Each structure stands twice: as structure tokens, then as C-alpha cells.
Image (cartoon, rainbow, N blue to C red):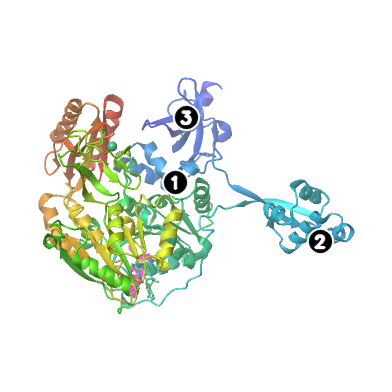
Amino acid sequence: MPDGDAKSLPAVEVLVNLSLDRTFDYLIPPHLIGRIQPGMKVNVPFGKGRKPRPATVTRLIPRPDRGDLKEILEICNDVPQIPDSLSKLGAWIADYYCCTREQALRALLPSAVRSGRIKPKKIRRCYLASPEKAAAYLEKNGLRAKVRSQAIQFITLHPGAPTDTVQSVTGAKPPQLRALEKAGILNIEEVRTDRDPLRHLEIVPSFPLKLTGEQGTALDKIFSMLAPDRPSASPHVLLLHGVTCSGKTEVYLQAIARVLEQGGNAIVLVPEISLTPQTVTRFRARFGERVSVLHSGLTQGERYDEWMKVYRGEVDIAVGARSALFAPFRNLKLIIVDEEHDSSYKQSEAPRYNARDVAVVRGRMEGALVILGSATPSLESWQNAVTGKYELASMPNRWDPSIVLPAVEIVDMRLEKDDEDRVPMFSKRLIDAVRSRIQAGEQSILFLNKRGYSRQLQCACGYVPTCPDCAVAYTYHKKNASLICHFCGRIVPAITSCPVCGQADFHYVGTGTERIESLAGALFQGARIARMDSDTMTNPQKYEEVLSKFRGGDIDILIGTQMIAKGLDFPNVTLVGVLNADMGLYLPDFRALERTFQLLAQVAGRAGRGEVHGQVLIQTFSPENPAILCAAEHSCKNFFEEELPIRKELLFPPFSHLTVLHFDGEDPVLIEAKAAELVNRIAERFPAPLEISDATSAPIERIKGRYRYLSTVRTPPNAAFRAFLRAEVMNWRRTVKDVDLYVDVDALSLL
Ligand code: ADP
Ligand code: ZN
């Protein structure tokens, strides 16, 4: 092609699917002009061999100033193109969370869709092509061609039956069906069919409930925020603070119904852990086939189909975990984030985004209302509501006033001694309470946020077996007599004699759920006991199995970790026992109190959801701790009043943005040196009010054989710092060997 022509061709800017974090320009060849849009997947020649590589178009360049660019090879038609609005959100994520554009883009498209390998599932369905011919065939061959006749009869009764069904019911073989098709008797059509993850569930339609006064007030506020003529400067986020059982879900359902009437789409996010079929069916029961489900428990095929339903506009509602936020709706009017305080909304690998916060951004970009719901809101959202950045609706009472919040009793474990003068796991109070519930035919939940048998083994000489790769003790798992590192997953057989002193005098230190199960078995003989933690719940079927047994009353005591703290709704549970409320209290993390408060308040909410009053017993060695006291009073307000002044004093969130810089590598001296350079550069360039700490050894010094160092940055909103940091991170990737750097923006954990 002559030079002059090339200059007049338009071009595009693309991101190649390699984590390079830079764009490249390509010309649009004449036959593709007018067909290329931002967000599209194309193949471009790239690198030495100019091999075709997939790339995503980020921008059109109508008049490029260079004529020597290479041309796009083709459009990848098999991969769906994300809407432009989502591309913009991806760019925002890359900037805000200091990750590469490619990493951000990857979060937007599920791998099932991105890979292009998953194809729609097709099935073949049989219809009668000509009832006359069918009748004639039966008349003529009825007795001789028995199998074929049966197939015809079956299809007459069940038009559209899948070929598989026809074959298995009548015994017909594929060639026989083909012969009937050839003879003009049958019609076999290939049609797309969805792999529906909920196909096994029986769903009974539900209808809008009559709302309580509090629900009505909350919904009115939502309706006014959904009104098309609302001034654009007013908040687009509502914090719905409702105690457990206040009926938040019913409010969500009626808000969605309004959005559907207006022709809009809605996204509902729930924490992965509470994404039980129970949750999802409530949305299907109200809105039927208009709901798609998106979460990590689906097969790749199911995920592809569910995503494609949104993409093709066949559904209006997406319910799912974190990643459902990126459902490719084009007329989004509502995003609901249930249990907005939940830390599972934060992704732990790049892009380290918090779906709650990105929901607020997507809502602003696309003009959608965002509802953040929780019984125990995060301090961040609470502060935003107090300062008027968000609207607030409160539902302080349970929907049915006769179902009062359970009475919570704090059991001071410092006063408990067993026969051998040791502190027992079960207080006398808790033992009595469980026994009387069993006698009354009611159910109990026992909560301990630690799986395994004991946190560690300890020899009388003091030796504690620890993982050689991570600076943590092994957790002892009795069932398979093994020691497991909960950080890297390393499993070794439990030792039978101490490598230091040669004795075998082991103690169990720090009890886990497995040990509680065996202690409970001895204490409550004859009781039916089940345990629910990630050791026993290895697949979703097991989870459903235990839940349905529990629901059916076939289990008296359910023992579990945080897996049972959330979202479960069982009217016959009248006792919740928290075995050790102090578990998370003394972690080196400024959110330790907030987490403990939220967890206890959530667990306590599991009791007394039916007619019988509930009771909660919290065993603790710190009965005066504010997190425990406020949870016992069911009072978020009191907790906020205790905690907010402390956060303010220390300039921690919500009074600052917290970013953690993580450095890791094999050589601690090198890490320290490299980290200090970066910390100094930042400190010099950004004086107070930005506060940056020296990089110090992380609380868990070593994971998988790599040393870890952390530095924390606290600052008021500071776009200049973020831009600077992002450039540093990108530069680091190119220039620094042997020490890895990643940054965790709005970090939830300091471990
Ligand atoms: P939350 O999410 O606030 O804990 P849910 O929305 O799960 O509460 O409601 C708990 C139970 O109360 C559900 O079984 C729900 O059907 C029922 N419920 C909620 N609101 C009403 C109402 N207005 N009338 C009757 N039942 C209701
Ligand atoms: Zn390990």
C-alpha cells in the first residue's frame, strides 16, 4: 500500500493481553473501517515474529500522526465485547488500585468468557414434521418397526423432547431417528440451551409482602432516590442499616421491582460465604427467569451461560459474589451490596479492588442508585452517612416485633475451672444451656472461628512444630493425624515424638472446631452433632446437605467457623454459643475490634429468629472489652461512639485512606534496602498530613519461603500520591529484580 494512503487510515490504541501496562497503536485496515469500537477484542501482529496476539481496543484515533503503524489483523468475533461503560470502569480501577490496565480488564470479564474456549451448549430437539406422514407410518409399520413407532408416538406426546430423552425412553438409535427425519416424518432441531446452576431447585413463586412501617419508610426513600427527576448533585448511595431479621431482603426485592418497571437493570452482591442456594432462590422466587446467578461455585459452562444471558439482554437482574458487579448491563439503575461491611468484597490478588467501593463508582458513572445494606455497617460507610455523603435509612427493629433480639449473656471465663483446675472450653452455663435446648427439642449453634483440632501442638519441653516455609505453627488436624500450615497448605504427618527432647508429651494449644466437636460429643451424649468449616465442607453439595438436615431438625448442635455466622435463617435455633470471643481481638490490626464486633453481632443474630426467644452466650476472657459489650447490647451506635474517636486520633480509616506497600523476596537485607529507598522517595515528596511508616517485618514474617515487609501510608484523599505511587509500581516491575512490590490500596488487613 502506498505511503500516502496509509496516512489517511484511522488507527486505534490497544492493550495487548500481556501485563505491559502500556498501549500500542495500530491502523484499521480499509475493510474494518467503521466496525471497530472501544472495548472490542482484536488480533494484532506483535513482537519479533509478528505473531497474532489478542488485544483490546481502548480508544479510536481518527487521524494518527504516524503512517508506519502495523495493521489490525482481524476482529475476534468469538469473544463478546464489553460495554464501553465497563471499559471506563476498568481504567478507573487500574488508576485507583495501582494495577496494570490488563489486570483491571481481566477482572471485568470472567475467564469462562475471556478464554473463548467455552461454547454455548446445544441440544437437539425432536418435533413431528408432518402429523399426516407420522400417522401413515404408524398405520403401515406399527408392529414391524416397533422402536421407531414408539419414538414417533413419544414425540407426538412430547413435542420438542431432546433426542437423548427420546433415545433413552424408546430405545431408538440415532440412525433410526435420522432415517425418520429423512423420510419427512420428524424434524430434529439444534437449539441453544442454558446450563442453569439452579435447575435442580424447586422454586415456589413469592409475592410482595406487606411492609412494616420501618420497611415502608426505607422503601419510600429508595423510590425518591430512583425518581428520574432527582437533582444530580444529591447522593446516589443509601446506607440501609437494619438489624438482622429487620427484613432488608424484602426491601431489596421491592426496590428491584420498581427498577424493572422503569425498564432498568439491577445487580445484587452478596458475600461469597452467604451465597447459598437459599439466598439466590429468594430472588428467583420473586423474579423467575429474569435473574442470572454469577459466582465462583459455578462450572465454567454455567458461568459462561449466566454471563451471556446478561450480555444478550435476556435477564434484568444479576445476583452474585464480588465479580457480579461487572455484569455487562447497559441500563443499570440499581446496585445492592448486601452485608456491605464484609471483607470478602475485597479481592486479595491484583486488582485488589473492593467491590463495595467500586459499586459506588460504577453507580456514579452509570447513574445508578447504590444501596449498601448491613446490620453492622463498616465505619467507612457509617461515617459517609453521618457526614451526608450518603443517605441513611434505619430499621432498628425486627420485622415482627414479637421476635425480639436475643438476650446476650457474657460468660467470664476467668472464673471457670474444671476438675483439674484448668480453664475448660465449655463453661457450666453453656453446658446447661445446650442440654436444656436438647431436652426442649430446640437447636443450638456453637461458634469458634478456628478450624482444625488445635491451633498448635506443643511438647512439654516447649517445642512447637512450625512450617519450614512460613513463620507460623502448624495446626493439628486429628482426623487424619496431620499437621497443616494454614498459610501455604503444606501437610505433614503429625509427629509422634519430639525432635528436640525425644519425649512424646504433647499438649494441644488453642482449640479448633474439630476438637470442639469431639468435646461436645462427650458432653452431650446422644445429641446429633454436625460440623461446618472448610475442612468438612469440601463441596457445595455437602454444605447443602448439612443445611437441609439442620433445617429439617435432624441435627441438634451445629458447630462451625465464620461459615455459619452469616445469612443463615433457622427459626428453631434458640441458642448460640460463642466459645472464644477473644480469638480475633488481639491481632496486630487496627480493625481487630471492628471485626470482632461485627462477627459477634452477626453470630448473635442467628438465634431466636422464630417464635421461641433466643439466647446467646459469649465466652470471653475480656468481658469489659467494648467490642464484646456493644455486641452484647446489639448496639452499633455505642460501638461507633467508642471506636470512631480512636480512629480519628490515630488518623486511621475512615479518617484517612490506608495503603499498604508489600515487599517480598528471598533476601531480607535486600528487601529492607529496596523498601527504604521507596519509602524515602515518598516521604520526601509528600510531607504531612501524609504519614508513611518505615518498612518493617510483617506480622507473619515469612510465607512460602519468602520474607515479607510492610510499610503503611495514611493520607487524606490524595490523587497526586496515587498517581506517583502507580508510576513507582510500574517502574519497579521493569527495573527491580529479586524484590517484589505490590500495593494494597484501601487495605483491609495489615497481616
Ligand atoms: P434481614 O436480611 O434483615 O436479616 P430478611 O430479609 O432475611 O432479614 O427477613 C427475615 C425473614 O422475615 C424472612 O423470612 C422474610 O420473609 C420475613 N419478612 C421480612 N419482612 C417481612 C414482612 N414485612 N412481612 C412478613 N414477613 C417478612
Ligand atoms: Zn507454610
Residue 682 or 270: which is nearer the viewer? 270
Secondary structure category for the residue under label 2: helix
Quarter of the figure with residue 672: top left
Q: Residue at x 47, y 65 (%)?
A: 260
Residue on which disc 1 sits: 84
Stretch of the chain drawn in magenta: 215-233
Q: Position of residue 483 (x, y in %)?
A: 29, 41
Question: What amino acid does circle 2 point to?
Answer: Pro
Q: Name the quadrant where ligand 1 sits.
A: bottom left
Does 432 sit left or right of 119 as displayed?
A: left
Residue on which disc 2 sits: 131
Question: Mark 3 or mark 2, which is nearer to you?
Answer: 2
The residue most toward the right is: 140
Residue 395 appears in the picture as rendered: no
Q: Position of residue 272 (x, y in %)?
A: 37, 53
In space, the residues marked 1 and 2 are separated at their CA atoms by: 50 Å
Does 293 sit left or right of 378 as displayed?
A: right
In space, the residues marked 3 and 2 are separated at their CA atoms by: 58 Å
Q: Residue at x 57, y 53 (%)?
A: 194
Disc 3 under 8 Å from ligand 2? The reply is: no
Residue on which disc 3 sits: 26
Look at the image and say whether residue 636 sits in the magenta stretch: no
Q: Position of residue 652 (x, y in %)?
A: 16, 50
Mark 1 Cα-neighbour bin, 10 Å: few <14, some 14–19, many ≥20: some
In space, the residues marked 3 and 1 are separated at their CA atoms by: 19 Å
Residue 670 appears in the picture as rendered: yes
Majority SS type along the magenta span: helix
Look at the image and say whether residue 229 sits in the magenta stretch: yes
Quarter of the figure with residue 639: bottom left
